[in-house]
Amino acid sequence: MTEAVIEARGLCNRFGSQSVHENLDLDLYRGEILAVVGGSGSGKSVLLRSIIGLRRPNEGTVKVFGQDLATLDENQRSLVERRFGVLFQKGALFSSLTVTENVALPLIEHAGLSRADAEHLAGVKLALAGLPISAADKYPASLSGGMIKRAALARALALDPDILFLDEPTAGLDPIGAAAFDQLILTLRDALGLSVFLITHDLDTLYTITDRVAVLSQKKVLVAGPLAEVEQTVDPWIHEYFHGPRGRAAEDAALRARQER
Amino acid sequence: MTAPSATLDTRQQPTRLRIAGDWTLAHYASLKRECERLRDQYGDETLADLSQLGRLDTAGASLLAELLGSERLSRCSDELPDASRALLKNVYCSVQDYCIPVKEPEQPVLLLLLARIGRAVDQLWQDTAQVLGFIGLILQTLFLRLFQPHRWRVTPVVAHLEQTGLDAAPIVALLTFLVGAVVAFLGATVLADFGATIFTVDLVAFSFLREFAVLLTAILMAGRTASAFTAQIGSMKANEEIDAIRTLGLNPIELLVVPRVLALLIALPLLTFVAMLCGMIGGAVVCALTLDISPAMFLSLLQSDIGVQHFLVGMAKAPFFAFLIAAIGCLEGFKVSGSAESVGAHTTSAVVQSIFVVIVLDAVAALFFMEMGW
């Protein structure tokens, strides 16, 4: 395995008396697509927020590119954060800006492009994310859920990040859109050498594009490894997850798709 | 890191475009200039040489794709590693899909101005019609429910009464006390020149009973309650809760609007009464401290000089203001569409409209009462 771009060690997250993570360890290696799965309320989003520094964990450290974000000063931190691209669950597009302006904003602020250049490049990224040109000048309020996801992905990719965090990227997309989204992520990973941290409930995504899967359960990472390995883990929840009716269907579909290719 | 470049090699035939270095976002501006400079210098037969290309990201790829075009790209992309080739191909497809939307030609300023005025007038007309329609809807619902006591919703009315009435009483009392004191000060200063400081009592009592108490309370309520109504109903609308109420076969007007309207109809007259008292107390304090008019004398002057019709004129306006403020607040809430931003915009609009309506109505009422000699 290559070097780890993210190392979380001994992570504890508690809300009042309720503990979400206890002594959680997780690595993300360069160039891999890591999927994090877990039941509702198992703290997937909390883990994401602790890694990107939106939430200070109660205990433990998160090292990104070998640096602990919590110990950096504001400028250094901002430099590291520019290497993140985050796609939030609901898109989190700025509602007062058009879609193009949303994507152009980081390009103007951080890459120092002129407005015209930034908007041109934003258009390319939007097209890359599969957003129709007619949507480029619209405000987020008038977009459908799938379009918001695509626009948000375009914004996450604006600065050509090293690590892409995706919080349920295919939720709310139609199957065609979701499959295209999966392929897009694969292509971008291969082309840009992205490391992708992916939270998902979508079993098809899991079987098609992930390199490793980490299962969050019982307040820690129960198992992390290639899918075939994870599937065989002896745990009732994991068994139910991967060998339940939906899991089997997704696996069959992935197998068939591979054979056809 | 190697500095990126694009050079045209004319020594060979056909000419070659040599692409070298890291084509990344960091060099975007300089690369773009380079590309624009080169654009006119090569023809269709020019070949591209990508063997020196270093790192490539989407920004660089989009420039390359625009510079080289599809034919050259497909011919020379064999030299590239798989990853860069895939990226280039994807970006190329995207660039083709994406063409800058045509901006509409700018129209003359005068035309724009006229169009804007026209739209504003039309909007005003529609808003008025909407308010009137909504008022009709509220009255209809109120009237229908009046004869069905078992369907009266007492609990929400009481809850809103607490929020809009009781919770607002301290601020109404304090503000009108202060304004009462200020009016008395003004009166004392001006009337002293005529040796008529005793009429300060009449000034304070007259102005507060007829106008200030009800007007100040209504404006405070417009700022405090109309905005709250819009925000409450608006966030429910944005959250599709109103639609949920409808699909459950319930009437949102009856459920959400009527209790609020009734609560404000009760609260505003009560608060107006509080405001009258506090304003006059403010005046009385100033009279006692600076004009040597004792509270007892203040009271007896009040009793002898000020007729009860002034109190009634003031109080009579309160229910109308209350109804309009509540109706506008609720209506703006229903107009909210989807986003949180829209909740904010409509809340502002509710406050502005209700203050506007209150002041206009008060002016009309003042004229009417004056003509009637009340």
Image (spheres, rainbow, N blue to C red):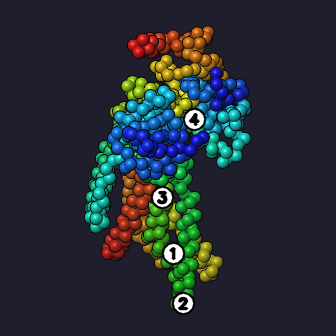
Please check whether the numbered discs 4 and 3 fall on a single chain: no
Please check whether the numbered discs 1 and 2 fall on a single chain: yes
Using the numbered discs, state the Cα–Cα distance from disc 4 to disc 1 in whole angstroms: 72 Å
Badge 2: chain ID:
B
Badge 3: chain ID:
B
Using the numbered discs, state the Cα–Cα distance from disc 2 to disc 4 in whole angstroms: 80 Å
Q: Label 4: few (<14), some or many (≥20) within 10 Å?
A: many
Q: Does the CB distance between marks 4 and 1 fall below 8 Å?
A: no
- Given this view, does label 4 or label 3 mark the residue nearer the observer? 4
* Residue that label 1 marks: B204
Q: Earlier in the sequence, mark 1 or mark 2?
A: 2
Residue B209: image location, x then y, percent: 46, 69
What residue lies at 62% left-to-right and 19% top-to-bottom? Answer: A224
Q: Which mark is residue B193?
A: 2
Q: Nearer the viewer, residue B59 or A78?
A: B59
* Residue that label 3 marks: B223
Q: Earlier in the sequence, mark 3 or mark 2?
A: 2
Name the kind of residue labelled 4 in the image. Answer: Asp
Name the kind of residue labelled 2 in the image. Answer: Asp
